[in-house]
Amino acid sequence: MNNIYIIFGVSGCGKTTIGKLLSQSLAIPFLDADAFHPKENIQKMTNGIALTDTDRKPWLENINRELIQQSHQKGAVLACSALKESYRKLLSKDIKHIEWMYLKGDFKTIQQRMQQREHFMNVNLLQSQFDTLEEPTYGMQISIEKLPENILSEILKILQES
């Protein structure tokens, strides 16, 4: 079994940027959870409508199936919001080796980042993400206040030490 690395946090915290850097550094595939959303979910978010747990469940189950498959191959890095503990349980079902990496930042910083990028996630939904977020008590907790390269270095250092 190979490791699965899940980088999570609210929209705009840098999951994709850090995930791609980590996957390149570890020479394993990068998966973006956004690519697993059905069209209906994307349409809702584009229109400023927050997803429900019912909307998210099949999406998370599809990602979990892919992660199980990847764990039998080279492993993978996943960028996924994974805001609630119940979502993280669905993602990790039947996977033995997961490294959780929570990218932590404040509302104002992330809101400014979101306003400077193009993404289907409506910036007006950011507060709903913070309202839904259940911060973990496990895994890495990484501040997003640093440059991406420095965040990557911090993650790699922690992985080497563990």
Image (cartoon, rainbow, N blue to C red):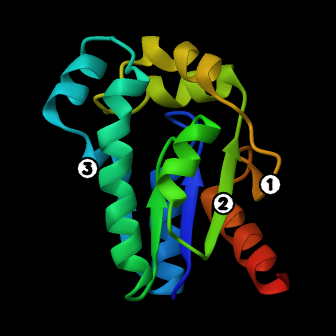
Q: Residues within 10 Å of mark 1 (few under 14, many from 20)?
A: few
Q: Which residue is mark 3?
A: 35
| Residue 47 x/y as whole percent | 25, 12
Quadrant of the snapshot with the C terminus: bottom right
The residue under label 1 is: 138
Return the x and y of residue 144 as percentages of the image width and height: 70, 45
Q: Give the distance between the C-alpha atoms of the residues marked 3 and 2, in whole angstroms.
A: 20 Å
Q: Residue furthest front?
A: 94
Q: Which residue is mark 2?
A: 100
- Amino acid at pointer 2: Trp
Seen at 71% across and 77% down, the residue is 156
- Left or right: 11 as drawn, with respect to 34: right
Answer few, some or many: residues within 10 Å of disc 2's Cα (few below 14, many 20 plus, some between 14 and 19): some
Secondary structure beneath disc 3?
helix
Residue 43 versus residue 92 in the image, above or below: above
Residue 124's label in the rendered image is none
Would you place residue 38 above or below residue 126 in this image?
A: below
Q: Residue at x 53, y 15 (%)?
A: 128
From the viewer's perspective, tell me whether residue 115 is left or right of residue 85: left
Given contact means CB atoms under 8 Å apart, are the residues at marks 1 and 2 in contact? Answer: yes
- C-alpha separation, residue under disc 1 versus residue under disc 2: 8 Å
